[in-house]
Structures are given as C-alpha cells and as structure tokens.
Amino acid sequence: MSGHDSKYFSTTKKGEIPELKEELNSQYKDKRKDAVKKVIAAMTVGKDVSSLFTDVVNCMQTENLELKKLVYLYLINYAKSQPDLAILAVNTFVKDSQDPNPLIRALAVRTMGCIRVDKITEYLCDPLQRCLKDDDPYVRKTAAICVAKLYDINAELVEDRGFLENLKDLISDNNPMVVANAVAALAEIQENSASPIFEITSHTLSKLLTALNECTEWGQVFILDALARYKAPDAREAENIVERVTPRLQHANCAVVLSAVKMILLQMEIITSTDVIRNLCKKMAPPLVTLLSAEPEIQYVALRNINLIVQKRPTILSHEIKVFFCKYNDPIYVKMEKLEIMIKLASDRNIDQVLLEFKEYATEVDVDFVRKAVRAIGRCAIKLDRAAERCISVLLELIKIKVNYVVQEAIIVIKDIFRRYPNTYESIIATLCESLDTLDEPEAKASMIWIIGEYAERIDNADELLESFLETFPEEPAMVQLQLLTATVKLFLKKPTDVPQQMIQAVLNNATVETDNPDLRDRAYIYWRLLSTDPEAAKDIVLAEKPVISDDSNLLEPSLLDELLANIATLSSVYHKPPEVFVTRAKVVTAKTDEEEYLDGNSETAYSETPSHVVSGGSPTASASAVASTSQPASRAPPTGPAAPLPDLLGDLIGMDNSAVVPADDPATPSAPPLPVLVPSSTGQGLQISAQLVRHEGQIFYSLLFENGSQVALDGFMIQFNKNSFGLAAGAPLQVPAIQPGTSARTLVPMNLFQNIMPGPPSSLLQVAVKNNQQPVWYFSDKIPLHVFFSEDGKMERSIFLEDLTNSVIHSIDATVEHLAASNVFFVAKRRNANKEVLYLSTKIPRGIPFLIEITAGLGVPGVKCAIKTPNPEYAPIFFEAMETLLV
Amino acid sequence: MAGAVSALFLLDIKGRVLVWRDYRGDVSAVQAERFFTKLIEKEADPESHSPVVHDDGVAYMFIQHNNVFLLTAARQNCNAASILLFLHRVVDVFKHYFEELEEESLRDNFVVVYELLDEMMDFGYPQYTEAKILSEFIKTDAYRMEVTQRPPMAVTNAVSWRSEGIRYKKNEVFLDVVESVNILVNSNGQIIRSDVVGALKMRTYLSGMPECKLGLNDRVLLEAQGRATKGKAIDLDDIKFHQCVRLARFENDRTISFIPPDGAFDLMTYRLSTQVKPLIWVEAQVEKHSRSRIELMVKARSQFKERSTATNVEIEVPVPADSTNPNIRTSMGSAAYAPENDALVWKIKSFPGGKEYMCRAEFSLPSITAEEGAPEKKAPIRVKFEIPYFTVSGIQVRYLKIIEKSGYQALPWVRYITMAGEYELRLI
C-alpha cells in the first residue's frame, strides 16, 4: 500500500511560491490537489508558505475529503499568523459542520478547535453546540474533546455558553467512547479551574464503571485516571469499586493495568478488612510481574512505579525478586531501575541469590551499571545486618579482581559499612590498604583516608599511609583535603608521637596559609585552636562516638509517596516528583520560576519544597518617577499595567506583579477595630501612623491610618517594606490623597507574598518605611501576625488530624470557636476531659503549611493549654504569638 | 490527573523532524528538534537513554523504530504508560499501512501520515489505533477509490475492533498455542529464573459477528464446574486478554467469550512461573591457552521426551572479539564462526529428545592484551529452538465454539508449539 508522495518534496528551479500560487488557482481539480500537497510538503520541511493562505483557503470548498483534510491541516498551522484571513474559512467550517457526512462534521469541529484565533472561536460556539447533540457518536466524541480545546482558549466562553453542562450530560451518553472523551475533557477542565466542575458522585461513579467495560483501551485509561480522584466514603463502597476494577488487571494494555493498579491501591487505603487487603495484594502481583514482559520503554515506566509500590506495600512483590534480575539484553535504563528494586526487595531469605547476581553485574562492561551494582552490595549490607558479613566478603572478592573503578566503588561503600557497624569489620582494613595506590577518584580517596583516620590506632603504619597522601596535599581536591586534615588530627590524638606531630604541623600549615579554600581554612583553624588550648577537649570532640547511619537514602517521605501513588502511570510517578513541580502550562511559561532547575528527568535528588520565586520588577527609576507624579488621589489603579516599584527606600528594591489591586476607597470599614499606633505623632512631626496586616476575602492587606496633626498638608505618600520572612511586599502603590492638617486618611495596601524572602529562621518582624513629600522618611517596625496567613483552605481531614495529634504540649490562653473561625482557624472536634474542654482546630498558611491545634482549658478558668502539630516546627513560636492574639 | 501531549514528532535518525503534528500549540518543532538532536549527540547510543526525559518544562517521551524516532512532547502530567504504549501502536498502524515504518515510507506517504495522526490522537489524547478499521476510511492513494465516506460504526462502537458485514465463503479459525520458555542460568549452573510465556494466536476468517467461546483445561474453571481434574488441568498465573474478551465475564465465571477481530491477533497471553526443567541444556568449557589460543567444548543435551523433536536449534556461544582461524568439529549439525556477533553459532536442524551432542572449536587470538585489562563483555550462551506439538504447561484447548446468527459451521484448527524465548546460560 505504499505511496509516492515523496515527489511532492522535490522543488523546481523556478520561484516556488509563484508557481504554487498559479497551480492552486488552476481550473483543474487534480492540479489543485497536487498543488495543495506540494504546499503541505513544503510546510512539512519547514518552509514558510503562509503567503499562499488565500489561495489555499480557496481550495477548501471541495467534495474531496482528502483535499479538505489537507487544507484544514494548512489552516491549523497558519491561521495564527494570518488571523484576519482565517476568517475567510469560517463560512466553510460552519457549512461543513452541518454536512450530511458525520466524518466531515467531526472534522470541521475538530479542526476549528485547533485554530487558536479568537475571531474563529466565536464562530465555533454554534457548530459545537449542535455537534454535542449530534446523532452520530463519532461527532459527539469529537465535540466532547473540542469543549476542552475551547476552554483552553477561552474559559469564560465555555462557561457562559453552558458547554460544561452539555459535557456533563455526555457522561450519561449511551456510547462508551463519547463518555470516555467527555471524562477526559472534564478532567482537564477541572485541573485548570479553581471551582468544582467535575465532581464524581456515586451516581457518576457507577455510570463510569459501566462504561469502563465497553470503551476502547485508551478510553478505559481516561476513566480510570479520572476515577482515581474519587474518595470512597466507606470501606464497603471501596470494596465495591475494587471489585469492578479488578478485571482490568487482565487487560492486554499495560496502561489500563497500571491505572487499575492505581485505583486499587487508592481504595485499599480505605478498606479495613485485612483479609481483603491480603487478597488484593496477591491479585496485583502477577499483573505487575507481567508488565516486565512489555516493551522496554513500558518496562521502564512500570519499574519506576513498582519502586513506589514496594515502598508502600512491600508484601506485594516480596516473593518475586527473581523477575527483577537483569537480562543480558535489557537496556541500561531498565537494568538500573531493576537494581534499585532488587535492593528494596532484598531480605535475609533471598540475600544469597541477590548477592550472586550483584557480583555477576559487577563484572559487566557498562561502568555506571557496575558501579551501581557495587553500591547495591553495600546498601544491602547496611540494610540487612545479618547479611553484612556475606556482603563484605563479596566486596573483597571484587576488590581482588583489581578492576580500578570496582575497587574504588567498593572502598566507598565499605566506608559506609564501617559507619553502620563500627568496630566490627576492621580486620579487612589490611586488604583495603593493598589497593591504596590505585585510588584516583576523590570520593574513593576520601573514603580510604577516613577509614585510616578512624581506625588509626589499629593500623600499625597509619602514619606512613597518610604521609604518602600528604605529599600531594596542595593538589588534592577539596573533599580529599578535608578528610586528610581530619584524619591527621585523629591520628595525632590517638598516637601523639613524633611523626604525627610533624605531620600535623605540615597539614595545618598547608590548610591555613597555603590554601584559598575557606572551608578548609576554617576547619584547620578550629583544630589548631582546639589542639593548642585544650588537647583533652579536642580528643572528646574529634574522637567522639558517631551516630550509626542507616540506609534511607532512596526512601521517599510517606506523604510524598502517597501523592506519587495517586499519580501512578503518569510522568509524576516516573520522575518521583509531585506534578506541580514540573507541570508548566503554556500560560505560565512566561513567568518561569527556579523550580525547573532541579528537574532533570532522571536525577534522584530528593524533592525540595522551597522553590524561591524571584520575579524581577520593571525599570525602577522610570516607574518610580511615574508614581511620584501621579500620587494624587487616584480612586482606582489600573488593573493591569506594569508593576510600579517604589524608590529604593530601604536599599532593597522589590519587584511586584500586581495581581489584585484594590481601590483605595474600598471599605476599610468604619467599624474596624482601632489599628495599633506604630508611629505616634510625637515622633512623627505631627503625623501619626497606625497600621496592621489584615486578611480580607482571601487576600492580605496592610491596613494603614494616617492622621495629620501637623501644620501642613501632606502629600506624595509612598511605602516600602524591607525583606522579611514571608516575602511580603506591596502589591500596588500606596494611594493616599493629600491629607490636610487635622484630617486623616485610611487605606488598604494589597500585599504580595514570597516576593523577596529573607533567609534564615522565620521571624515576625516587618520593617516598613513611609515617606511623603513634606517630611523625612519614617521607619517603623511592625509584627507580622501569622494568623493573617491562615488561608481559607486550611480545613483538614479529621482522621489525619487525630492521628497527628500525639505529642508536644506547650502553653497559651482561652477562646471560642466562632471567633477563631472568623480568622480562618477551623473547628474540627471537641471533647470533655475531666472538667476541661478540649478543642481541636486546624489552619493553614500559604505554601500549604498546615497547623493542627489542640486547645485544653477549664471553662472560665484563665490559662489555656495549646498544642500544635505542623511539618514546619520552626513556625511554632510565632504561631503561638498569633494564637495568643486571637484568644484575648 | 488529566494530561495530554502537546505534539507528536516523527524524527529521522539524527533527530531532525520528518513530520509532526501540533496538538496544543505550546511546544514548537524547533524546541523539540533542538532538544532531541542534542540528546542524540550527547549519547552515543540513544537506546541506552531512558525513554522519558525532562527539559525546559517539557516532558519528552520517545521510542525508536528502524531509523525513525517517535517522540511526544508534553507540558502536563500525562499518563506515561499510556503515551509510550500509544507510540508503539502508532508504529503498528504505520506498519499495517506501509509494510515497514522508516524514513522513506513516511516521506512517501506523508499525506496519509497526517490523516492518521489526526485520527489517532485528538488534542493530545489517544483516540483510536485499530489499524484494520482505520484503513476502512483512511486509505493510501492506490486504494483511494474505495474510500467509505463515513466513519465505520466500529470506531465508536462497544465492539471497536470489528466491522459489520464481513463475508467469507469458507469460515475458518486457526488457533496457535505458542509457548516461549524464558530461562536464566547463572555461571554456577543454577537456574535462577525460569518462566513460560504463552500466547494464543488466532487468525479468524469468519463472516458476520460471530460469538466465540473458548474452553481451556483451566484448573480454576474445571474445579468450579466440579469436574475431575486428574493431572490434566493447569494453573495459569497471569492471563492477559485482547480487548475483545469480556473481562467482567471472565472474572465472574472464568468463561472466555468474545467477538473476535477479523484476521490475526493475540487472543490471550499467560505466564507460568513454575520452575521448568531446561528443555535444552548447554554446557561450555572454555580454555584460554597463553592468551593466544582459545578452545571451546560445547555440550548440548535435550531434556524432553523422546517422542518430541526440537527443530531449528541454534546455539550461540560467545567468543573473544579478536578470534580468528576457527577450527570447528561437531557430532551433529553444523557450526560456524559469526564474527559479526563475536560468537560461535551451532545449528542443528533436528534434535530428538534424550540426546546429547558435542561441538569443539579452536580459535587463535592475535591481539596482545594487558595482563589486567578491562573485563571483556560477558555475553551469555543463547539458545533458540522450536518443539512442535508440545507445550510445557500442558495447556489444552478443549473447545472453541463459534455461534453466528446465520448459523454457519466454522472449522477451528488448533496447533501447539513451544519455542525458546529469552534462553540464556551465563558462561563461567
């Protein structure tokens, strides 16, 4: 069935575009069709043929389906660059969307949705409305996806025209393919919308589970993935769902199997019966094993997921370690992942066999794989104390092969084994020392030196060994220098004889005077001072007993693990990172953050939760002068427009993106409580400034009151915030009209968060500078009441809460639930304990940091016990300050 | 949870775009091409690179087929398993259309390629990949005349793999039970892993919409029906079915019922992880003499019943890369040096059960190597064979019932065969 389209790629000598233009306008159908093919061929190889737009669109009205498709394809590519001409195509589109042939109706709607030109989208609405109710399921399934396309271009339009309702109706469609596409579209729309659009009720649940049996394999994946968001209300329903999903494990499509596994694992969290759980674990093992017979790329995804699954439920595959043994022809990326899982599944029962495998791998050719295999032996030794000895003997055997990189890797892991089992295996040191002179990698050298230093008293010639390294001290990498320094000090403290004394002097001299490395110098000076002032103290410090290490290097945090398990089969589960870290919708691409830096596909570094958002502001001087000249009472700031940073008052200019600018006349309600006075009129040359951070409808404002007690009118007010722990910064310029003597002005400054974060432990200090045209700059300090950050979404599941509240108790005062709720501290439960009332509450501050609170108090008795639980305990002190304020 | 890809690229071996389809307009061809050519340059062997790579906010997933890369770019958290599998299906569809998928065939058929990409995926969501049905409404030039101008019912039907109105004069079904034996023996001669992967491969030439029901000697089913199971029934570890099989029904009462696609397909695959005795055991003694000469003695023994015979046995024993001057003798079959694989390949056309054959070979090693050189690539001995009329598992097709409303009689033909899968014995 091979074609001969390649001829369309060949070009003639003559000017190509004019020739094509001529052919496109030919009176012969075939010639026109060939010309369009040539245009598409040119487009395919990346030539710009947008100048032929009108001529190509003229060919659109045709009965020939193939030609029509080609013209449509052209439109998708070039409509954006010729939006005005694209409108020419609209008529044909609308006409085609009513064609008697469903293939053409669907094609028209599908293509229109792909043309991301505003003018066209307006005309898309009516055809889409019709097609969503089309008789032919092929058209409806295409229209369902088209709603998602339209939502991506113009979400408001979709909501206004009621397409969401139409889409939800399609969930009950009698055609399974339509249902599946509607689910995919709704799930995507939900992802990009804050309001609840696609809520899975038990009714939709049963509909979708039914459709699951009938739709295509891809549709099954959409449905299973969408259902993963559904939380069963109780164990019985969870069991029901699992029962309906389990047959999917038998599907030939691996993606269906993995999505089914995801569903089952999630429901298992709710199921209470241990029998059912055990049974499910047994049922899931064979399908997971079979995934390893799939194409290598799929195997890779499966292995990354299995890595997560065995961390959560080690029993599922505990007897299947053999299937993870590497085959000779496995691609290296599969082998690496298999190794990781083998370590996780290694146990006292199977370690002998596993070690044989590792030993086999350690003699292969791929250097990275060999190194990983050697490391794997070390990790097993650390993990299984009963097998440690066998692991070490395998490592020694490998050292005897004398392959350079194997030896070095072995020494690195043996150092870790020594740290795990101190004073147990020193007998092998002699063997290690034999390979001393072959070491050339910094990490291996450093490890060996550490071992010599740590066990200097048992190595007769420790001084000679170290001395051999010392000769090249200045040329060594920093890692080795640091270890040499420490090891020499240890040696000196253990054997304070002549030779070590000379060595220590040489080393200290080298590490202080002769080096540019501040770390090395600092460490050397500390040792020097210790040794010269109090050698006994030095001994206590340097030779102190060290804590034993454990192998948790590749285990994930439980909360992260749960999140990743909810994302099985997706990219998130492949990266082992939550989706929000790497998902960059096109819309937010412009405001790129540093987050992407630590995302490089394969790195195994732990996910860090502290992205720093640094958004640089516009040109400071230009916009500053603009602010100064327009500081007249402006009732409404422009809603968009460039951010306007203020003059650099505190020497630290902060950029802003004014997401929400609140008009200055917006109610700082008269009934609001009096603001604390921060600059009294006595120090403010008659101007009194009162201010406080407040929360209003989900947004943080700095509420300010200026009272002019001076003799002159004050104008040109500006405000600036210094760097602080929360990165609070003004979201808009201060808008205060000229204040006549004896009058006052109130204003709210919308605040942005995380603009310019002060490093170090969190502090509640907020330094503010205010100036006007008549007076000097007023600097004052305010406290950041943490409770203004308590966000509306701080409600937390009760079960988590009760679980988390087990330890830590500290003191504070008394209050009522309503009062706290008004400040977004949410009530969870209460109980009576003897004559005390116990309240459980929860709240959350930005960046998703939750607080769980337990308040214990006797009614009417002053003095309240308050205990909190939070993943970020460093916030505890200021949190208690905030609670104290709220509970007056 | 939702996620779709932004674009699908077909790239040549150097990573340059041949054809691409933009689904969302948020990843450009230039961006993808720049990334991928760099990746290929950096990695000498792109196959060693993991198939999911993240770069500058875009997740790239790719597979390779001949001299073509299929690559998707995504900005969302899409289902990686589904997308990678989809790429493999795209390869299948293209192969169905162009016989072979390679750079040339893509260029020769770019119009159809565009049409297919438009139909198989919409807005980055996989839609439809049944090659046979697709070719009913998307055709290459040669067949353009007979295009149906409507989407076949099957595209959206619950039975999405079969069109209505198929007619055959003679209604026949061919059922091949193919079992592949995978085995891994370590250098101590210990079997460290062995399993059997079976497949029921069907070729159906049936009219209309036939309802099929397949009966196997499945222990669970037979026991449920209360039948005697003296030694005949077997346990199947993990069964995977083609999408035509009603999974809920199977879960319920272990009945395998389905409306088959037309033509060839894999009805089901299964796996047995019970230890199997290696059907053909190979031992090789390698003696290296003074680093200039190597002697191999290979023994092969068939460990199955005498009435069965293995055919097309091929034993591949690795030898050093610099081997020359082969001197080979065999007690059966023929052996030859295959320098392209760095191996001695010994072929035996017919190998009856319970027999043992020998092969001796001697090579010169001209290269001078350091005493403690880097380790040589340690390939295992690999064995290929086929044993007709025999299954390791003992699986039996008890019946295949075919019911169609027109009431025709169809003839099922069943055949059994066992072959070597990944059959590896590591050298000492």
Image (cartoon, coloured by chain):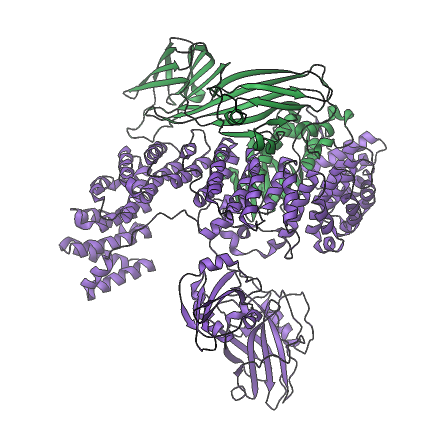
Residue sitting at 46 percent across and 36 percent down? A334
Of the 4 image quadrants, the one containing the C terminus of chain B is: top left
Rendered location of residue A454, percent (x, y): 23, 51
In the rendered image of the structure, the colour used to display chain A is purple
Examine the image and state in which quarter residue A137 appears: top right
* Front in this rendered view, residue B262 or A437: B262
Residue sitting at 65 percent across and 32 percent down? B129
Examine the image and state in which quarter residue A19 appears: top right
Task: Count numbered badges in the picture.
Answer: 0
Rendered location of residue B206, percent (x, y): 68, 20
Chain letter corresponding to the colour green: B
Q: Is residue A850 above or below residue A820?
A: above
State the residue lying farthest toward the bottom.
Answer: A711
State the residue lying farthest toward the top.
Answer: B331
Confirm whether residue B49 shows in the render. Answer: no
In the rendered structure, the answer to whether residue A457 lies left or right of residue A9 reads: left
Q: Is residue B115 above or below residue A80?
A: above
Rendered location of residue A239, percent (x, y): 54, 43
Residue sitting at 35 percent across and 18 percent down? B283
Rendered location of residue A323, percent (x, y): 43, 32
Q: Is residue B88 above or below residue A828?
A: above
State the residue lying farthest toward the front.
Answer: B226
* Front in this rendered view, residue A459 or A848: A848
